[in-house]
Amino acid sequence: MPERFSASVASKHINCHASANLDLAIPNWTPPEVDPSADNAANRGTEMHRMFAEIMCLPTADGRRMAEAIAYVAEVRARRRFKVMSEQVVVAEWLDTKPSTCADLVLFVQDEIHVFDLKTGKIPVSAYENEQLMYYAVTYGPLAPKATGVHLHIVQPWADNIETWFASSARLQQFMHDAQAAEKRIQAGSTKFSPGDHCKFCEANPHGRGARGRPNCPAMMQLLYPQALPDYEAMLDMVDEE
């Protein structure tokens, strides 16, 4: 059977008819083996087209924002010949429970490492003292054993927010100790409430931005809707007067 006439082979077929019938035109000709996993130009081109199609299907505004994110990462990546890890799951060996985690993007060489977190929300998120990013930094940090810290990046073009913060090795060491201590208390059964900004996505937060369960967190309810406690001294005075 002749090769199917398609847009991608139109020039070849119009100019060389034999190219569509190579098995007839060349004695004992055998087609090449096609390996879809091979690192070659054809497969890279196919993957590029797939990604291009997905991005182009986004709403126009989202496509522009995604382009901003890609441009920022490309600018950082161009500084050195970084190795790249994208959405690669690793195990947090530094915690007793050995949980797995997955950063959006990690660029690294022996003495420098960058961790990127893509945010699509419209409320700006800071890279400074960001516990999620420091968790990633401690976990992926060994990839750059000669680095003096980790460059942490929040890439959030939907909020006009692209921010970076360098977390020193000393700061990451302190974070690791704090996280390990918290894990030990939690594993021991601690149920201590400490409401604050970190409650934003907690399932027990009545104003949480994620899924919510019932009943609500009593500490958060008291913080949001403080109940006036009885004035026991005044009540005793009233009894004495009677």
Image: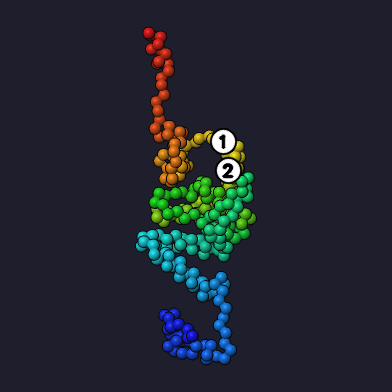
For the residues labelled 2 and 1, the Cα–Cα distance comes to 14 Å
Query: What x and y, as percent, mark residue 109?
Result: 60, 60
Query: What x and y, as percent, mark residue 8?
Result: 44, 80
Query: What x and y, as percent, mark residue 75?
Result: 48, 62
Residue bearing mark 2: 179
**Mark 2 against mark 1, which lies toward the viewer?**
1
Which one is nearer the viewer's eye here, 10 or 141? 10
Amino acid beneath label 1: Ser
Which one is nearer the viewer's eye here, 57 or 115? 57
Residue bearing mark 1: 190
Residue drawn at point x = 60 percent, y = 42 percent: 180
- Classed neighbour count for the residue bearing mark 1: other residues with Cα under 10 Å, few (<14), some (14–19), many (≥20): few
Using residue 94 as the reference point, say whether residue 204 is left or right of it: left
Whether residue 112 is situated above or below residue 38 in the rendered picture: above
Sequence-earlier tag: 2 or 1: 2
- Location of residue 10 (image quadrant): bottom left
Residue lying furthest front = 1
Q: Is residue 39 visible?
A: no
The image quadrant where one finds the C terminus is top left
Give the structural element (helix, strand or loop) at label 2. Answer: helix
Instruction: Identify the colour scheme used.
Output: rainbow
Amino acid beneath label 2: Ala
Q: What mark, if any, has residue 200 been given in the picture?
A: none
Residue drawn at point x = 51 percent, y = 56 percent: 104
Q: Is residue 79 visible?
A: yes
Residue drawn at point x = 53 percent, y = 60 percent: 86
Residue drawn at point x = 51 percent, y = 51 percent: 165
